[in-house]
Image (spheres, rainbow, N blue to C red):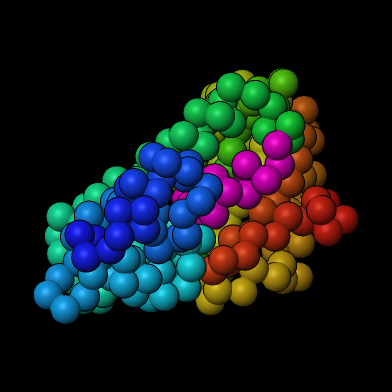
């Protein structure tokens, strides 16, 4: 970055004009700090963003994919993974502090970060208190790339253990397409009926693809 005029260097630009003045590659360049011979750090940041198909993709990128970017060694990979984990934890704390549906987009962001990069299907339940604040997130079932088995009695057991008043269901589609299937809709209704017996409300079922998150409640499928 020393080759750039001072006013165009990301750090100086941020300090002078604020973070919003920087482009995506410039912000990422501040984390990476250095490029490699023949490739400046801003260009390297652009390579990372391109490989991950945008910043949203970067947040959901598995560690193995970062290794494919030339110039992104173990130290830089670790820094990016740490930032992504910090983002997950920050969103989790926000969900615990206020009712989840005060900011439904935050729930989608949180689940996108949790599930977007998983190579196999994972079924997750967010257990909420009576005010719909997050009590606990549980990865309940892991399946193959195409299917998973979900047992209502296990969901009920944990709902009672956590004294939950409501739940948000979620799972990912490793194929990348987040559109709900008939099986997804059937599972939602099965769990909704089972949990109603113990006075636990199903607020939503969220499906995570690659760069896309779909809410069954928003689709009117709940």
Residue at the right extreme?
220
Answer left or right for 64 relative to 111. left
The residue at the point 15 percent across, 55 percent down is 75
- Residue 28 image point, x, y percent: 36, 57
**Magenta residues, as a range?**
103-116
Reply above or below: 139 against 25.
above
- The N terminus sits in image quarter: bottom left
Q: Is residue 182 visible?
A: yes
The residue at the point 31 percent across, 72 percent down is 43
Q: Is residue 151 visible?
A: no
Of residues 85 and 49, the one drawn nearer to the viewer in this rendering: 49
- Residue 92 image point, x, y percent: 50, 34
Does the segment drawn in magenta span residue 108?
A: yes
Of residues 181 and 156, the one drawn nearer to the viewer in this rendering: 181
Of residues 35 and 197, the one drawn nearer to the viewer in this rendering: 35
Reply above or below: 202 against 34.
above
The residue at the point 76 percent across, 62 percent down is 185
Does the segment drawn in magenta span residue 117?
A: no
Q: Main secondary structure of the magenta part?
A: helix
- Residue 95 image point, x, y percent: 58, 31
Answer left or right for 7 relative to 175. left
- Residue 105 image point, x, y percent: 68, 45
Reply above or below: 42 against 100.
below
Reply above or below: 76 against 138.
below
The residue at the point 39 percent across, 40 percent down is 15
Task: Report the label total.
Answer: 0
Answer left or right for 112 relative to 133. left
Residue at the left extreme?
37
Dividing the picture into quadrants, the one containing residue 70 is bottom left
């Amino acid at each position: 970055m020393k080759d750039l005029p001072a006013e165009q260097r990301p750090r100086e630009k941020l300090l002078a004009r604020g973070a919003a003045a920087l482009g995506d590659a410039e912000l990422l360049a501040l984390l990476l700090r250095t490029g490699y011979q023949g490739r400046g750090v801003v260009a390297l940041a652009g390579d990372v963003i391109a490989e991950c198909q945008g910043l949203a993709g970067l947040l959901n990128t598995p560690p193995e994919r970062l290794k494919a970017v030339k110039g992104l060694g173990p130290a830089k990979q670790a820094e990016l993974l740490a930032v992504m984990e910090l983002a997950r934890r920050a969103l989790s704390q926000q969900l615990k502090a206020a009712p989840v549906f005060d900011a439904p987009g935050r729930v989608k962001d949180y689940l996108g970060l949790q599930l977007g990069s998983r190579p196999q299907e994972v079924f997750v339940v967010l257990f909420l208190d009576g005010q719909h604040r997050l009590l606990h997130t549980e990865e309940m079932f892991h399946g193959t790339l195409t299917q998973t088995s979900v047992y209502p009695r296990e969901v009920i057991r944990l709902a009672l253990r956590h004294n939950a008043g409501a739940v948000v269901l979620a799972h990912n589609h490793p194929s990348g397409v987040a559109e709900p299937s008939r099986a997804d809709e059937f599972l939602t209704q099965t769990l909704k009926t089972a949990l109603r017996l113990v006075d636990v409300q199903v607020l939503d079922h969220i499906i995570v693809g690659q760069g896309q998150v779909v809410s069954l409640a928003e689709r009117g499928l709940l």
